[in-house]
Image (cartoon, rainbow, N blue to C red):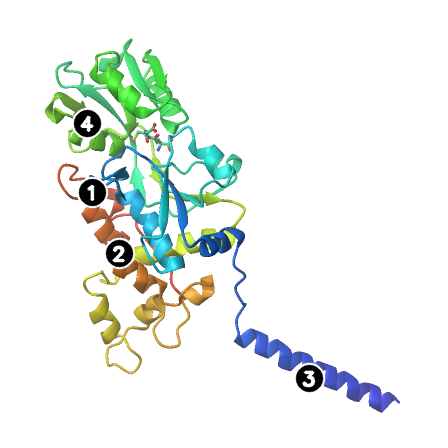
């Protein structure tokens, strides 16, 4: 009796061991989150964007959305659906974005949105990695001769509602002991129009936004973005880390967005672009001399798991780079060109002194 009990215990332990080890070999099967599932069923990603921020997000002459922020929507669609074109864009104002995200009218938001503590907690949102490290700036007219915040004492500064900008400008002026009048508008284009019409002495928002508006204004030379005392850079009155946002209800989808962005950062770091992808693939096949394991893991070459951890195509980084490009290509195509000519600055790779850094793909 005692003997047979021991025997059956041994059998149970053996069975558990076999089942356990086969589970471990399979890794954890990925359970797709509700938003990921919806995107797959719909065959399309719904992405909330800015309708009027050339360089970052605006319709082109053919009515298609193009720009830096738009390309991250396209990258996520390529990662999940295999096609960067499988995106439906929803134009949203700054004030509309929180509700749209909370109601899950959009799968993700990619709209010059600053990552802050209050938004991360009270929006019911998950912030993806920062794709553009920005700061708030202030614009005056060349004609006014105002080149400092002190020069704006007692004057009218305009911006749009529902933004980090409103609080930041108040802090910046108060810290310097400068009184001023803040006028806010429902949308930034209205604030900019009021400024151009002389109703505001200055207008303030993200420096990227000011550069975009200046570049596309009828007379860019008539507009001045305040600079630091030594003139070497724009005056930054805040930190504005901008990046995509997803609803908090789906951590699995948030992982896909996060690692799609990291994949684009890592691809730039390892010299993998839409132009070099075929050569990189060929040079890194198993058994090829000089093949780099770090690249094999990133691109999911051979037996290396990559997208399989996310429940999407194992070679998702290859698909994204082929169709959208690496981070540097996306930056160059949209922002390094005239009329914007935005320098990489903090948005350089960490290997070049910037903040763009991807954790390991392992
Ligand atoms: N990054 C800031 C500001 C974003 C913002 O609203 N920027 C303006 C100026 S570039 C804009 O997008 N305006 C368009 C609008 O108001 O709809 C935030 O997240 O609050």
Residue drawn where x is 44% and y is 67% of the image: 308
Question: How many residues crowd mark 4 within 10 Å: few (<14), some (14–19), many (20+)?
Answer: some
Cβ atoms at labels 4 and 3 below 8 Å apart: no
Nearest to viewer (mark 3 / mark 2): 2
Q: Which circle's residue, 1 or 4, is located before the other in the chain?
A: 4
The answer for how far apart the CA atoms under marks 1 and 4 are is: 20 Å
Query: Could you say whether the residue bearing mark 1 is in a helix, strand or loop?
Result: helix
Q: Is mark 4 within 8 Å of ligand 1?
A: no
Q: Which residue is mark 3?
A: 14
Residue 227, numbered circle = 4
User: Which quarter shows the N terminus?
Assistant: bottom right
Q: Position of residue 7 (x, y in %)?
A: 78, 89
Give 179 or 341, whichever is nearer the viewer.
341
Give 43 or 179, whichever is nearer the viewer.
43
Q: Position of residue 270 (x, y in %)?
A: 25, 63
The answer for how far apart the CA atoms under marks 4 and 3 are is: 72 Å
Nearest to viewer (mark 4 / mark 3): 3
Cβ atoms at labels 3 and 2 below 8 Å apart: no
The answer for how far apart the CA atoms under marks 3 and 2 are is: 48 Å
**Residue extending farthest top:** 154
Question: How many residues crowd mark 1 within 10 Å: few (<14), some (14–19), many (20+)?
Answer: many
Residue 335, numbered circle = 1
Cβ atoms at labels 2 and 1 below 8 Å apart: no
Q: Which residue is mark 2?
A: 326
The answer for how far apart the CA atoms under marks 4 and 2 are is: 31 Å
Q: Is residue 328 visible?
A: yes
Query: Could you say whether the residue bearing mark 3 is in a helix, strand or loop?
Result: helix
């Amino acid at each position: 009796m005692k003997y047979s009990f021991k025997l059956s215990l041994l059998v149970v332990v053996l069975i558990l061991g076999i089942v356990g080890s086969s589970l471990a070999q399979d890794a954890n099967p990925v359970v797709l989150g509700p938003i990921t599932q919806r995107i797959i069923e719909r065959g399309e990603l719904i992405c909330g964007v800015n309708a009027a921020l050339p360089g970052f997000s605006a319709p082109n002459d053919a009515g298609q959305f193009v720009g830096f922020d738009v390309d991250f929507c396209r990258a996520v669609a390529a990662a999940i659906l295999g096609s960067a074109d499988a995106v439906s864009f929803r134009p949203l104002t700054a004030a509309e974005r929180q509700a749209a995200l909370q109601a899950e009218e959009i799968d993700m938001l990619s709209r010059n949105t600053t990552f802050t503590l209050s938004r991360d907690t009270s929006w019911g949102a998950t912030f993806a990695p920062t794709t553009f490290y920005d700061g708030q700036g202030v614009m005056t007219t060349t004609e006014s001769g105002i080149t400092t915040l002190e020069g704006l004492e007692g004057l009218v500064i305009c911006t749009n509602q529902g933004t980090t900008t409103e609080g930041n400008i108040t802090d910046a002026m108060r810290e310097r002991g400068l009184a001023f009048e803040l006028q806010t508008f429902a949308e930034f284009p209205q604030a900019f129009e009021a400024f151009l019409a002389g109703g505001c002495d200055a207008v303030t928002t993200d420096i990227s936004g000011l550069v975009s508006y200046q570049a596309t204004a009828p007379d860019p030379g008539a507009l001045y973005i305040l600079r630091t005392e030594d003139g070497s850079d724009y005056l930054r009155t805040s930190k504005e880390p901008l990046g995509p946002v997803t609803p908090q209800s789906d951590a699995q989808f948030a992982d896909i967005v996060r690692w799609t962005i990291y994949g684009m950062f890592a691809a730039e770091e390892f010299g993998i672009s839409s132009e070099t992808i075929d050569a990189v693939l060929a040079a890194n096949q198993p058994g090829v001399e000089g093949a780099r394991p770090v690249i094999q893991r990133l691109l999911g070459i051979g037996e290396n798991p990559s997208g399989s951890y996310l429940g999407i195509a194992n070679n998702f980084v290859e698909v994204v780079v082929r169709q959208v490009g690496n981070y540097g290509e996306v930056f160059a195509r949209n922002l390094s060109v005239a009329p914007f000519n935005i320098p990489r600055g903090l948005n350089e790779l960490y290997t070049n002194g910037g903040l763009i850094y991807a954790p390991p793909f392992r």
